[in-house]
Amino acid sequence: MRKTPAAVSGLAVLALAALTLVGCSAGAPAACDRPAVSDPVVMDLITVSGDADEAPEIDIPTPLRLVEGGYHDVITGEGTPLTAPSQLSVLDITLVNGATGETIVQAPSETDLTAVFPTSAITDIIPAFESALQCATEGSRVVVALAPGDMSADLMTRFGLAEDDSAVAVIDVRKVYLPRAEGTLQFNSGNGLPSISRAPDGRPGISFPDAAAPTDLVIQTLIKGDGDVVTGDAPVRVHYSGAVWGADETFDSSWDGEGRSLTLDGVVPGFAAALEGQTVGSQVMVVVPPDQGYGDQAQGSIPAGSTLVFVIDILGLDAAATQ
């Protein structure tokens, strides 16, 4: 199956300031139980105004010298929460120097919703963002107070901060993708079809029956989500695992990395048919006969004439690429 490369990061300015970005494997979704303000005494020193869809106005007493950091949800969105390090999102970040009040990193005037990154791309650079973003919801504006030591010495140097300087960040959570399928379990008879198990992080396991593969395309919705409908007008972000009928191992899986962005005309016909008309949050199993897969052509480890089985978690719809 052809794949679409990941979009350029919306954290490009901040990411380029770091030496490396280390990805994290998917983890089990965490329970969301955190205060909207971690330390009122610290966060009362910082005033942030403006609408969530506009650049923030940040007012701090200068020089701002902090012993400990903290965070405050000045706007709380009602969308999907961030619960896993590998979860994909679009974040706009403004960063100011606590000593001078000068802007170090400015959020773009127009958000590029194609700039999708795992949350770990930013928390690996600034670990203090991890607690601030844990359970933050799409549409939220989170103010983060950064004390000396909350950023690496190298990153502080790159930002022109002295070793004892503090900083203030405003993170606008523009878009959050699901970490896995979330919805209502559906009943399927499953006679003569593979059975699907799920690890705590959502990764599926595929067990095959002692039976011949179906000769027709079979699509079963295993979990029914309540999100937007996949129409093909926008790329769809998914996790999936694929196996040849009867094989002990998968030939391809996205679960060891980030979810993948796919277009319906960029995948085999049976895979596209399984996605079209489904809703975000759903998990779908599709059995793809050779005539709707790779036919009589071998593809890497996939023998010619193979019947394929895919389990697909629909995580969200991507924005159209900006010109």
Image (cartoon, rainbow, N blue to C red):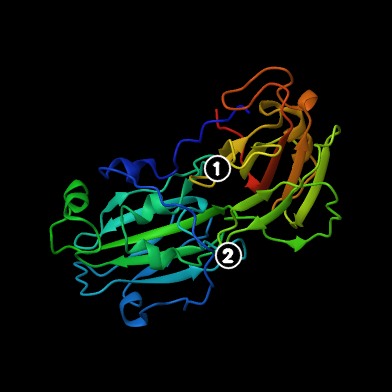
Q: Residue at x 35, y 75 (%)?
A: 43
Residue type highlighted by circle 2 = Gly
Q: Residue at x 81, y 37 (%)?
A: 212
Q: Secondary structure at mark 1?
A: loop
Pointer 2: what residue?
77
Using residue 126 as the reference point, say whether residue 156 is left or right of it: left
Crowding at mark 2 (Cα within 10 Å: few <14, some 14-19, many 20+): some
Work out whether mark 2 precedes mark 1 in sequence or the reverse, and give the earlier one: 2
Q: Position of residue 250 (x, y in %)?
A: 59, 40
Q: Secondary structure at mark 2?
A: loop
Residue type highlighted by circle 1 = Ser
Using residue 313 as the reference point, say whether residue 173 is left or right of it: left
Above/below status of 208 relative to 58: above
Query: Is 191 or 1 nearer to us in this picture?
Result: 191
Dividing the picture into quadrants, the one containing residue 58 is: bottom left
Would residue 287 be visible to someone looking at this image? Answer: yes
Labelled disc at residue 160? none
Q: Residue furthest front?
A: 210
Above/below status of 136 relative to 264: below
Above/below status of 39 relative to 192: below
Q: Position of residue 86 (x, y in %)?
A: 47, 53
Q: Residue furthest top?
A: 297
Using residue 63 as the reference point, say whether residue 208 is left or right of it: right
Would residue 237 be visible to someone looking at this image? Answer: no
Pointer 1: what residue?
254
Q: CA distance from mark 2 to mark 1?
A: 29 Å
